[in-house]
Image (cartoon, rainbow, N blue to C red):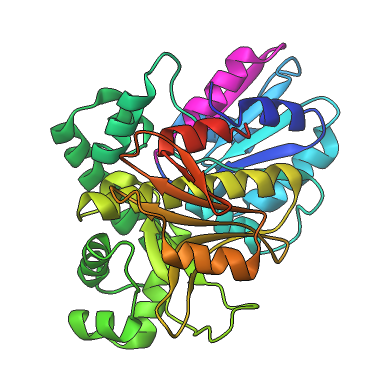
Amino acid sequence: MRYLTPYIIKDLQKKMVFVGGPRQVGKTTLAKKILDAHSSTGRYFNWDYDEDRQDILKKKWSHKNHLLIFDELHKYPGWKNWIKGLYDVEHEQHSFLVTGSARLDIYRQGGDSLLGRYHYWRLHPFTLDEFPEGMDKEEVFRRLMTIGGFPEPFIADDKREARRWRRERFDRVLREDIRDLEKIQNISQLSLLLDLLRTRVSGLIVVSNLARDIQVASQTIKHWLEILQRMYLVFSVKPYTMNIPRAILKPSKIYFYDNGDVLGDKGAIFENLVASSLLKRIQFLEDRDGYQYQLCYIRDKEGREVDFVIVKDNKIEEIIEVKYGDETLSKSLQYYNERLKPRKATQIVAGLKRDYDKQGIQVISPLNYFSERTFW
């Protein structure tokens, strides 16, 4: 059972539920599991399937189908008005679950015609604090570092098949999803940008440098980065500058939703794993509790830097430094812990044998950090 399942089932009792997230992250499987577990009968519709599409347009289902699931419904041009009208008329008789890829999130943000009628959840890949039952955490960590957390390659645990899966996923996102939404003439240059980003995880992303490397305008790079983020391929971590003496506005860092996308050393791969796990956690808390979270990093003019800052409603919750093998307490983490006084300061070390606390900072392995802080 995926981590969102009980919350979605509960929300379906009150409103429609929309589930978005990266392509192939398991939204359809999640929806079908919820249908199987539902106490009454229901029906699953996929807009890409001809017979289902005709039944959707004709509103052809039984009054006994208490739960109606519409997969990829956002491909229907008038889907928002269609589902709004359906919900307003039939919400006392049916519950509605709508799933989709990045396009669902984009269209959702485009207007408020559905305001007050639904709850929205974002589904993420497997992480150290959410994975299939019966797996050992050491094995989970190995797969996350070598294969990535998307369900199909993660479960198969085959590097060759994972590479094939990843290439096909990139092709579908670049050549289908993006073309459906954006007028981009040269997909090959956008693909080149994606390849460059895969080698620059954890580093500062300087737009002018990328523009020079790909030989396009800086404004074009900015636009393409926004597209890749909307497609759930990458996400940005921006600098935190409030209340930091001599802070400087630095470029963002870019990380990948799929840890298997990263082309770099183990340190970069591990930092991406922590980043994607933290993003999954704070987006879950946003969707469940309604708080506003940000994932940032800190760097000042003296070069003191901490990898991640978790900000909740404009207040620092935690500062986190990530190390693959170095157990020595980070001096930058000590500096910011003394001056910013966050609720918690943590150094996560991949190869740490024994956790310890020093100067108000917890030094901990990723297996213990995520197992001790379970929110689902």
As drawn, which residue projects farthest toward the front? 359
Compared with residue 17, is residue 188 higher up or lower down, i.e. above or below? below
Q: Which quadrant of the figure contains the C terminus?
A: top right
**Residue 304 position in % (x across, y down):** 43, 74
Looking at the rendering, the stretch of residues picked out in magenta corresponds to 24-47
| Lateral position of residue 361 relative to residue 195, left or right | right
In front of the other: 267 or 106? 267
| Lateral position of residue 324 relative to residue 18, left or right | left
Compared with residue 82, is residue 47 higher up or lower down, i.e. above or below? above
Q: Is residue 16 in the magenta section?
A: no
Tell me where residue 314 sits by quadrant.
bottom right
Residue located 55% across and 54% down the image: 359
Residue located 34% across and 74% down the image: 205
Residue located 51% across and 54% down the image: 103
| Lateral position of residue 292 relative to residue 260, left or right | right
Tell me where residue 218 sits by quadrant.
bottom left
As drawn, which residue projects farthest toward the left? 160
In front of the other: 176 or 362? 362
Residue 18 visible, this orientation: yes
